[in-house]
Image (cartoon, rainbow, N blue to C red):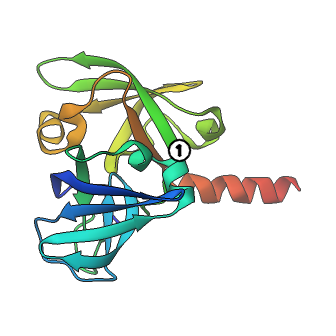
Amino acid sequence: MFTGIIEGVIKVGRVKREGRGASFHLQLPFDANIKESVSINGVCLTIESIHGKAAVFKAVEETIEKTNLSILKPGDRVNIERPLKIGDLLGGHFVYGHVDGMGKLVDVKKSPFSTELAIEYPLELDKFIARKGSIALDGISLTVVDVSPHLFRVAIVPYTMKNTNLKYRKRGDCLNIEVDPFSRYIERIREATDE
């Protein structure tokens, strides 16, 4: 489990396609061991092996199909975060690293105090996204400013723009979306009571 408070932005090293899966070599800026989990663009992946300073992560077909890891190439910049530990501050919200789908960045509006992003999202996520609710984009904990069918907006403070891969994003880019996990449970309870 993560908090959505990004620890760093790093460049992807080697990418190896393996059937419908893939492996990624990343030089982490912190010490890590085999079997540990790391959030990469909001996707929880496990370190499979370590070669020199590079940690190797493998992603299965399901992960590749539903996330922007499918389009990663060497040199691309990704957000990283280590898992939450007991006693850590929860500065964002609970982020599981289980991406629900991809959104498309369709508009960017800059002001002196913030940058507003408009994200087009898959219709099946509509029931999970609410105004003032939490959402994770590429693993970043954010608050939904406004929502309409297929589109939500988030406001990014300058610190977050400077310290995440959002500063490299442009219109048309795909971002990983993880809805607030509590909204999933609420929807499941609602469905169960309707049955």
Say what secondary structure mark 1 lies in. Answer: strand
Compared to residue 176, the image places residue 146 above or below, namely above
Q: Quadrant of the C terminus?
A: bottom right
Question: In the image shown, does 174 or 84 lie closer to the viewer?
Answer: 174
Image quadrant in which you'd find residue 89: bottom left
Q: Position of residue 183 (x, y in %)?
A: 57, 52
Regarding residue 32, the answer to whether it shows in the image is yes
| Residue located at (70% from left, 57% from top) | 188
Residue 184 image offset from top left, x and y in percent: 60, 55
- Total labels: the figure holds 1
Q: State which quadrant residue 192 falls in.
A: bottom right
Residue type for callout 1: Gly
Residue 91 lies, with reference to residue 168, above or below; the image says below
Q: Where's residue 51, x and y in %?
A: 19, 76
Q: Is residue 1 at least partly visible in the picture?
A: no
90 relative to 173 in the view: left or right:
left
Residue located beneath label 1 in the image: 101
User: Residue 55 location in percent, x, y?
Assistant: 23, 71
